[in-house]
Amino acid sequence: MAHRKSPSVMGIINLNPDSFYSESRCITEKQIEERFEMMVQENADIIDLGACSTRPGLKSIPEDLEWEYLKPGLKVLMKRHPECTVSIDTFRSSIVERAYDFIGDFIVNDISAGEDDTEMLDMVSKLALPYIAMHKKGTPENMQDYCQYDDVVNEVHDYFVNFLNKALDKGIKDITLDPGFGFAKDTFQNYQLLKRLDELKIERGDSTGSWPILVGISRKSMIHRFLGITPEESLPATTALNLQALIKGADILRVHDVKEARQIVKIFTNFIA
């Protein structure tokens, strides 16, 4: 079995005014610069730029508005931190193409695994970009109406097997799988996914181990709503669950709080893994 490398930390920068966690919203160039600087100082491996909020119940913004929100973040990246590895959280192939023309290579972080834009997988293949595919059902506006599963872990696993066949046929080689915590899952289902995360490990078939898994549970409602607290009060529980995710095989933690995630990764790598 391939030796597991140290898990990565992905820091979230939301470039729109609608993110569920207010502290992550960066609207002005100064706010974006400050958040970039902080995440670089705290050693984020990847910085995830999101211009279209996908929180439950929210309707997606038009493409042109998504681009207008995204552009200042790309400008800060190019001007201040061109050395950074970034991902762009979008389900639109046109945004991928425009961003590629603007900054070159980046990681595509698609909540729809190519389902919301039939041209996405072809675009990613054409540009030879790394791709993060997330499981969900429905749209952010209505996805909480689609929480019916016989066994959520088995269904997400089978979804990823089918997706991988499709993506590999397209020629996409660098793929990460995201179970989609909070996307068409209720609280119990989210914790089932976390508890049985290791069951989502799918072997590559070339003796290099399994496809990497990203876990994004930072400050989500599965934590704060269940505990009767606010997203702002959810960091301790988020940190505890991130450690559980690492123990169960997560390769990337997508977080609002890079410093704390980096501390957990250090403890895990040195004493638990």
Image (spheres, rainbow, N blue to C red):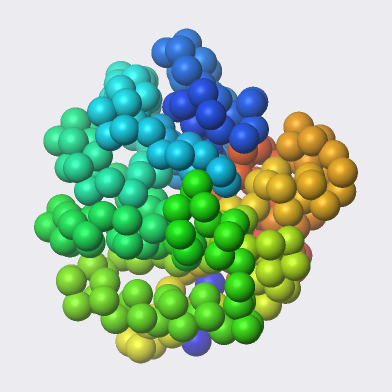
Residue 154, position in %: x, y? 57, 84
Image quadrant occupied by the C terminus: bottom right
Front residue of 128 and 226: 226
- Tally the numbered discs: 0
Up-down: is 160 above or below 176?
below
Image: 50 above or below 146: above
**Residue 185 placement, left or right of 206:** right
Relative placement, left or right, of 226 versus 164 is right
Quarter occupied by residue 267: bottom right
Tell me if residue 2 can be seen: no
Q: Which of 51 and 171 is in front in this view?
A: 51
Question: Which residue is at 39% across, 58% downward?
Answer: 112
Query: Is 17 positioned to the left or the right of 63 in the image?
Result: right
Hey, which quadrant is residue 215 in on the image?
A: bottom right
Q: Where is residue 59 in the image (x, y as percent from the top left)?
A: 45, 39
- Residue toward you, 226 or 269: 226
Q: Where is residue 189 in the image (x, y as percent from the top left)?
A: 69, 69
Taking the spot 53% from the left edge, 29% from the top edge, the residue there is 18
Looking at the image, residue 126 sits to the left or right of residue 257; the answer is left
Q: Which residue is drawn at 50% across and 87% down?
A: 1
Q: In this view, does 33 lie above or below 166?
A: above
Point out the residue furthest to the right here: 228
The reply to whether residue 113 is visible in this rendering is: yes
In percent of width and height, residue 208 lies at 39, 81
Q: Name the residue: 49% across, 31% down.
A: 14
